[in-house]
Amino acid sequence: MNDSLYTDQILIEKCKKGDQEAFDLLVRRYENKVYQYAYRLTQNQEDAADVASETFIRMYNSLKNFRGESQLSTWLYRVVSNVFYDFRKKERSHDHLPLEIPTDEGESEMERPLEDPNSVDMDEHILKMERNRILMNAIKQLPEYQRVMVVLFHVEDRPYEEIAQIMDMPLGTVKSRLNRARAALREILEPHLELFGLEGSPNEQISR
Amino acid sequence: MHCEQIKTLLTDYLDGSIDQAMRQLIDSHLQNCAGCQRELNALRILWSELPQLPPVDPPAFLHERIMSRVEAQQTRQTQTQRAGFWDWIRGYRQAFAGAGVMAVLLLTLFAVNPGNMVGSGLFPGIQKRDEKPTETLGQPVTLVWEGVQVNWEEGFPALVVGTRQGVEAKLEWSQDGKAFQTIWKGTLNPNQQFEMPLGWLRQIPGSKVNANVLRWTQGSQTKVLFVPTGFSASEIADLRLRDTFTNALKVIAAQYQQTIIWETDSLSENPYVVLDARNATCEAAIEKLIQGAFQLTKRDGHWVITKL
Ligand SMILES: [Zn+2]
């Protein structure tokens, strides 16, 4: 079966008739995307692979009810988000970790001091990597709902309308929640903002 | 405006989702304020770098893991659903072994919540019904209930709702009948059909029983549904358990594979009950549970519990 020949809808119809190969193709088509999103949320290879697996189990179980009213990708975003909430809930019930307190690991990484961030010869590439690391850590500290919001909008680049569909919320709610999530992220990044101010003017001494 | 106010608006400013007058205000402030200017630069980098996070390589085992898990789940589905339920019932049986007194009691309320839960008033006595359910169990059934249906296709239930008027609605799920979490929330437009496959509910970690508690709220109306999620049904069974009232309804729904609908006001009172129903039909088991304090009727192949 040639992957590119079939639309999602055709593959879904084949799946409904019990075509395993069609299901395999659907998984191959979306596993990378699903994994990327799951990884941004969980920030852990094992967890992301587990979330992806559970997502496709749910897809398998629900395909016969899939009516094609929304894009499969939109629907998958929603399932990944829900699986992620479930995983976190399970994790919490094991660890007895309160909802919004970052793990020790996250904390210590966030607090790790940088070698003189104002140094003029700090390589732009290293700087960018360091920003990425800090960004990922900051996202990890957001509560689940806000994390999903920020990742969908800023990392996955989904428009408001699609997020509204994914999260089953009115557009206005999406916007206000996203604003809250961004403010929270900005707050978490407070100690590191100098790092973000450096770009474009690496020679400028920033005093705060 | 103060810097603090300006700073809260800067993300919108970058998005362009801010009106012209406000934009001009911010522009003029930015010209004279190095602090806000710095904040703006930082935010610009922050929001522009998030989409540029380098993609991560999926692990080599990803496809294999997904496919093997899906496959494992397929084969497990029929076997363990059943086994899990019986293990659970067996656990209760063991817990009750030797407690001869229990056998005498058809239904006992435990005073868990004596303040608002008084046994005598709520469950005054037993009223047995003689009719037996007439439909063939295990057949696809449809629940029609004020616009809400639970459809069964090949053992997979799906909730289907349609309304004639636009209305705010909400579907919630609960493990214990107490803490509900929202599955779906939105506006139902006139003549629009909302459909939610419920097969995935059996995937929920820690779910012990093959029935789920769902709460459908439509406008100001709230109904609670005990929806079985599929394995072969019993016509006659021995049910002995001690649990909360809602969990007892879940067990009955699972055992007989019948959807049970709770149509009275609320489930805020959820007392502990002992149910000892032997050689009982679904109807007899429910009757023993509600002890004539509520009315049990059959509607469109489903059991409906309403106020007397
Ligand atoms: Zn200012």
Image: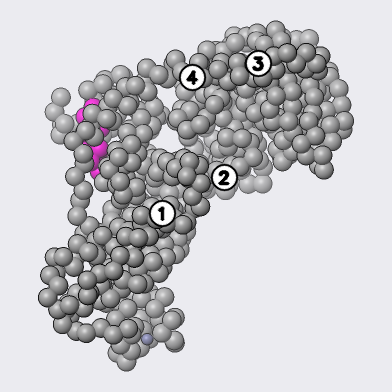
Point out the tag, 2 or 3, that comes first from the N-terminus.
3
Q: Nearer the viewer, mark 1 or mark 2?
A: 1
Residue at (62, 31) in percent of width and height: B225
For the residues carrying marks 1 and 4, which lies nearer the camera in this image?
1
Q: Could you tell me the amino acid type at mark 1?
A: Thr
Under 8 Å from ligand 1: the CB of mark 1?
A: no
Q: CA distance from mark 1 to mark 3?
A: 42 Å
Q: Is residue B95 part of the magenta span, yes or no?
A: no
Query: Which residue lies under the disc numbered 4?
Result: B81
Element marked by disc 1: loop
- The relative height of residue B237 versus residue B16 in the rendered view (above or below) is above
Q: Position of residue B59 (x, y in %)?
A: 21, 39
Residue at x 26%, y 72% (from the top left corner): A196
Report how far apart the C-alphas of labels 1 and 4 lie in the structure.
35 Å
Residue A56 marker: none
Task: Give the image location of residue A6, x and y in percent.
Answer: 19, 31
Tell me the amino acid under the disc marked 4.
Gln
Q: Is mark 2 within 8 Å of ligand 1?
A: no
Please give left or right for residue B6 compared with residue A128 in the image.
right
Q: Is residue A151 left or right of residue B140?
A: left
Within 10 Å of disc 2 (Cα), the crowding (few <14, some 14-19, many 20+) is some
Q: Which residue is mark 2?
A: B169
Determine if marks 1 and 3 fall on one subunit: no
Q: Pointer 1: what residue?
A: A103
**SS of the residue under disc 4:** helix
Quadrant of the rendering where the N terminus of chain A is positioned: top left
Task: Report the magenta residues as a range.
Answer: A24-33
Q: Quadrant of the C terminus of chain A?
A: bottom left
Q: Earlier in the sequence, mark 2 or mark 4?
A: 4
C-alpha gap between disc 1 and disc 2: 37 Å
Discs 2, 4: same chain: yes
